[in-house]
Image (cartoon, helix red, strand yellow):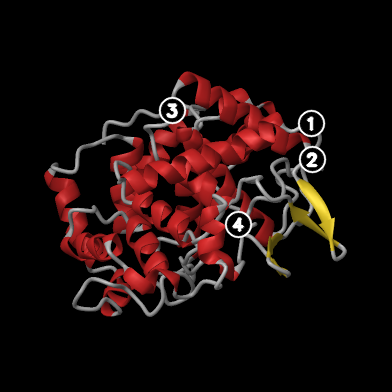
Amino acid sequence: MITMLNKVIDELLEKACPAIRYRVRREILHQPPEMPQLQALQDLILADPAVRQTLAAQGPDGWIGRDFHGADSMEGGIRLLCEKGMEPSQPPLARALQALTHPGERLGKGLAKAGPSLDAQGLDGPELIRAVVFAYAGIEDRPDLQAKIRHALQAFQTVRDMGSPDEPFEPYRGKRVLRQGFIWPGVYHLRLLAFTQGWRSAANMKMAAEAVQRLVDYSPLPVYYLRWGSQLIAPGLFCMDDFNPSLPELDDNGWMFWFHRAELLARLGVVPAVPALQRQVHKLAEMMNDNDGWFTLRLESPYFRKIGPYAGLMLEQDWRVPRRRIYDLTFRSLLILHYSGYLDLQCGA
């Protein structure tokens, strides 16, 4: 399959959009950003229509959009720039990250009033989300971010150490509610650990793998809520409900959740230690092998297309040309295979 995928990579490097070409070279082939080819691709990324639209919403102080979280937001804007492959040293992204360093009251915009309370509990409040945004850009040496990494590890340790799947929860007004003092892992905890490196001791990696195995064992996971005073708040449950789906028997939205979760788990480094994840990655490789190395399922969910705080993975300008959809989904598949350690991809391009 290596030879087949080398041919796929060669075509992506020749014909895919600049973002995919750049990220294949940086993440899969590990080429340094100083290379002339990569510097030229950075210029093309700056000219990408989605990038230009995002930067048109950037103010003089570097802030992108109206809110911190939501559809028109700093979080969504920085995630898009990072997904497109923009280096943090590029002036627009550097200005945005600097603005995020001292956001003031803007950090709460687009979030519920319970945000600070959620942060105090180690859950997905604005400070945790801000830590994740910095992590997207490869920044993890901030003291506040290190504190959030400790909360994320505690969340996964809760899962690893629980005696039953019901232990961290209690009934309240007919709903399943997280008990006070417990931290349950949400997508922002997973993202923070997936995009940072400094926490990865042998003991922490073992704990994370055991926790993910528990999440697999108890999947699909029931809905739960957070209690804030007498109010119930829905936490960030995006893609965190089923760690053991059957491939390829998913609808389009199911595939979108799977791609997002599988890439994060691959980046987390736990796939080799969790048999169900190994089976999912193996099935992905089989599907690609049956189609000359390409991911060819016609997935049309709109959640694939617009990159925002939660959903979105389309790097090509549009999917009206089917080959562009195949390039996007094949690139995501290659990332999952690569970060899973499933294949040692080699390409001389």
Q: Earlier in the sequence, mark 4 or mark 2?
A: 2
Q: Position of residue 123 (x, y in %)?
A: 56, 53
**Number of the label disc, if any, that sits on residue 167:** 2
**In terms of secondary structure, where does tag 1 sit?**
loop
The answer to whether residue 284 is above or below residue 179 is above
Q: Position of residue 141 (x, y in %)?
A: 29, 41
Amino acid type at image mark 3: Arg
Residue identified by numbered label 1: 163
Task: Please rate how many residues cluster around mark 1, counting C-alpha atoms within 10 Å: few if below 14, some from 14 to 19, many from 20.
Answer: few
Q: Nearer the viewer, mark 3 or mark 1?
A: 1
Q: CA distance from mark 2 to mark 1?
A: 7 Å
Amino acid type at image mark 2: Glu
Disc 3 and disc 1 in contact, CB within 8 angstroms: no
Q: Position of residue 57 (x, y in %)?
A: 30, 79
The answer to whether residue 224 is above or below residue 155 is below
Disc 2 and disc 3 in contact, CB within 8 angstroms: no
Residue identified by numbered label 3: 200
Q: Nearer the viewer, residue 234 or 50?
A: 234
Q: Nearer the viewer, mark 2 or mark 3?
A: 2
**In terms of secondary structure, where does tag 3 sit?**
loop
Q: CA distance from mark 3 to mark 4?
A: 28 Å
Q: Please indicate, yes or no, whether residue 292 appears anywhere in the rendered image.
A: no
Q: Earlier in the sequence, mark 1 or mark 4?
A: 1
Q: Earlier in the sequence, mark 3 or mark 1?
A: 1
Residue identified by numbered label 4: 256
Q: Earlier in the sequence, mark 2 or mark 3?
A: 2
Q: CA distance from mark 2 to mark 3?
A: 27 Å
**In terms of secondary structure, where does tag 2 sit?**
loop
Q: CA distance from mark 3 to mark 1?
A: 25 Å
Amino acid type at image mark 1: Gly
